[in-house]
Amino acid sequence: MATSQPRVVAAALAGITLSSAFVGANLALCYVAVPSLLLPAPSESAATSSTKTSASSPHLARQWRSIYDRAMPVGITGSAISSASFVYAALHLPGNHSMQRNLLFAAASMAVFVVPYTIALMKPTNRLLMEQAKTDDALTESSEANVTEIGVPKAPGISGYRTDELINRWGMLNYGRASIPSVGIACAIAALLW
């Protein structure tokens, strides 16, 4: 890329940085948040291979929703700004840099492709988890419901899926979502080095 275009390089680097932050945050959710949510109950011994989590199914979904509600606006904003940075860099390249321009447009596309991926593949799981979280919202209004929920084994959740299964599924789908901007990062780096 022409080093005489510092604005182009800066915009491409901003896009790479924001896309990298998106990938890192999504991988952190997969590696840190999901396993932490699914920790076994404290009374379980280390030798027991129980899948029972310490939180009730509806409360587990409520915890997931709290993470989701905090991460969603940051992810959307970061993806949009990252894509805009790549587009800006592509549009401000001189005319003789068509390969770099195409790579930057590809990077911009990958930065926003997480939206259709989320809608097409993750929305059904998100919807089921949100419904489970609403169940916990209703339970917290009744203290007796909270008392009877403690220690009760998880029953099948909405549509026959247990909440921990839904959260595991969400984590696996999130790995896929994290890989999409990684392709864009590679394209943008190639454009900078070309």
Image (cartoon, rainbow, N blue to C red):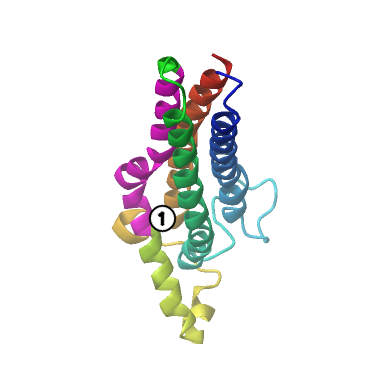
Where's residue 107, x and y in %? 45, 29
Return the residue at label 1.
162
Secondary structure predominantly adopted by residues drawn in magenta: helix
Residue 118 part of the magenta segment: yes
Query: Where 98 falls versus 33 (above or below)?
Result: above
Residue shown at the point (55%, 35%) measured from the top left:
11
Residue shown at the point (45%, 41%) measured from the top left:
84
Mark 1, secondary structure of its residue: loop
Residue 3 part of the magenta segment: no
Query: Where 155 falls versus 83 (above or below)?
Result: below
The part of the chain drawn in magenta is 100-128
* Depth order, front residue of 39/138: 138
Query: Crowdedness of circle 1 by 10 Å Cα count: few (<14), some, many (20+)?
Result: some
Report which quarter residue 118 is drawn in. top left
Residue shown at the point (31%, 51%) measured from the top left:
124
- Name the amino acid, label 1: Arg
- Locate residue 40 relative to residue 186 in the image: left or right: right
